[in-house]
Amino acid sequence: MVTNNDRIAELAVAIRNHGRKGDRVEDKFTFPWIGFNAKMNSMEAIVGLGALDHLDAYIERRRKNYRMLRDGLGVDLLPDANGAKIAHHCFPILFKSREMRDRILAAIFETGIECRRLYSSLPTEEESYRHLGYKHGDFPVAEDLSGRGLFLPIHQNLTDEDIEYMISAIQPLLL
């Protein structure tokens, strides 16, 4: 994770260490947040450190892929706001209805282009959350977006040709 926000950094460090507040003696066994312990092993650290050397290029490539899809498809859900620069992980599209989304999602899938539903693991839709007692309607905004949206890939391994193929295959479906 990369951030220039001290509060976010503090929270991230705490969450990765069982939610522990800090390393000062008075904080050592204070757990104000729910967290976990998922520290990397040495091999994962080596790979991660190597990837950091390419981080700026990866982010720029993802931004370029996002811009190409935005311009080619005529869809833009996430404009940069207030001078912020988004490091996109995917390209979201929202449709007027679940039926329209499902039809287009199936058609895109048939072209061989990776795609998936937007927010496909809501507590109201997943067996693993059933024990929490949530029911349809408890998260109306998330349920609406999840039901009408899909994600397209924009990862750094996609070439201009890949993005151009995506545009040519998907654009007719959006008309």
Image: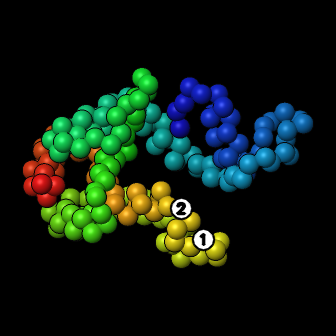
Relative horizontal placement of residue 129, taking residue 67 as reference (left or right): right
| Depicted 171 relative to depicted 147: above or below | above
| Residue linked to disc 2 | 139
Which residue is at 23% across, 44% downward?
Answer: 75
Residue 91, percent from left and from top: 31, 47
Q: Residue at x 40, y 34 (%)?
A: 86
Quarter that holds the C terminus = bottom left
> Regarding mark 2 in the picture, which secondary structure is present there?
loop
Q: Is residue 92 visible?
A: yes
- Image quadrant of residue 72? top left
Label 1 belongs to which residue?
134
In this rendering, is residue 124 above or below 164?
A: below
Residue found at the very far top of the displayed protein: 83
Instruction: Tell me the residue at 29%/51% (across/down).
Output: 93
Does the CB distance between marks 2 and 1 fall below 8 Å? yes
Q: Amino acid at mark 1?
A: Tyr
Residue type marked 2: Phe
Q: In this orientation, which residue lies closer to the viewer: 122 or 161?
A: 122
